[in-house]
Image (spheres, grey):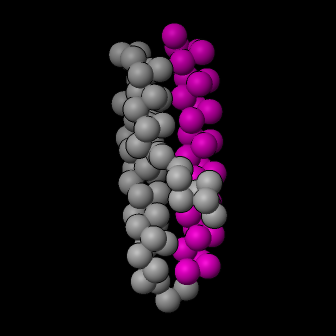
Amino acid sequence: PLAISRYDADLKVGTAKAQMGTLAGREELVKKLEAKAAEIATLKREVAEGKSKEPGAVERSLSERVKEFEGLLWDVKFFVLIHG
């Protein structure tokens, strides 16, 4: 899908880091965001290159990772609200 292919997890990680600033305890959340963003980037490459034997499965996995990543972004908002 077009929305997934244009999804910019790295930009969202940068925004989340800026929102958290230097709040104590943010390190673990940053690690999770970066790891999930890396997974998304890998899956996006697989979809774009079309080399997968099961492209449908890769697209579903990518969609699931984006949904999980969006959940982490909500965690960032709550973290900032509570600790900021």
Which residue does the image show at 42% across and 83% down from the upper left? 51
- Residue 55 shows up from this direction: yes
Q: Quadrant of residue 55?
A: bottom right
Please state the horizontal and vertical placement of residue 59, each as a whole percent of the image.
58, 70
Q: Quadrant of residue 46?
A: bottom left
Q: Of all residues shown, which one is farthest toward the top?
A: 84
Residue numbers of the magenta segment? 55-84
Q: How many marks?
A: 0
Please state the horizontal and vertical placement of residue 52, each as a whole percent of the image.
46, 83
Please state the horizontal and vertical placement of residue 58, each as a whole percent of the image.
54, 74
Tell me: residue 73, above or below residue 80: below
Which residue does the image show at 55% across and 46% down from the upper left? 69
- Residue 39 shows up from this direction: no
Tell me: residue 15, above or below residue 48: above
Camera-nearest residue between 7 and 22 = 7
Which residue does the image show at 40% across and 32% down from the upper left? 14
Of the 4 image quadrants, the one containing the N terminus is bottom right
Which residue does the image show at 59% across and 15% down from the upper left? 82
Tell me: residue 13, above or below residue 19: below
Q: For residue 45: magenta?
A: no
Please state the horizontal and vertical placement of residue 68, each as a whole percent of the image.
60, 50
